[in-house]
Amino acid sequence: MAAGPTNIDELVEELAAIEHQRWAHWQQYMHSEAERQADGSLVIPADLVKRWERQIKTVYDQLPDDERASDREQVMKYLPLVQRFFTRGAG
């Protein structure tokens, strides 16, 4: 098991790296679902825009179970690092 961060600055950097991976994965998904135009721009299908706009307007506890599960899946990418940080004690 990795030692994990020993101070808040290290924790922030490691969490930022995870966040970047999460964001890059999301962007890759979005780009794969969109239609690339001749000028390089992307057009997102209307059904996805509708779904994402609904999700934006919905508080977490009102989301369907599968969408909450997806959010929990993302948290699990962060949680082990945060647990190690607090188990070792903030420096």
Image (tube, grey):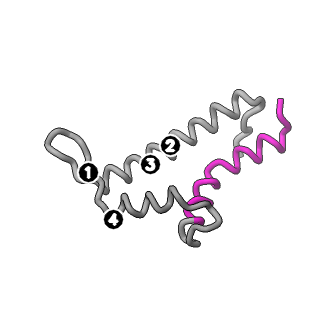
Circle number at residue 89:
none
Q: Quadrant of the C terminus?
A: top right
* Mark-to-mark CA distance, 4 and 1: 12 Å
Question: If you read the primary sequence from the N terminus, does the residue marked by circle 1 or circle 3 appear first?
Answer: 3
Asked if the residue under mark 2 is in contact with the one under mark 1, i.e. CB atoms within 8 Å, the reply is: no
Residue at which label 4 appears: 47
Give the overall secondary structure of the magenta segment. Answer: helix
Q: Which residues are magenta?
A: 68-91
* Mark-to-mark CA distance, 4 and 3: 20 Å
Question: If you read the primary sequence from the N terminus, does the residue marked by circle 4 or circle 3 appear first?
Answer: 3
Residue at which label 3 appears: 25
* Residue in the picture at 61% in, 68% down: 62
Residue at which label 2 appears: 21
Q: Residue 80: horizontal and vertical position, in percent?
A: 70, 49
* Residue in the picture at 69% in, 29% down: 10
Residue at which label 1 appears: 43
Q: Amino acid at mark 2?
A: Gln
* Mark-to-mark CA distance, 2 and 4: 26 Å
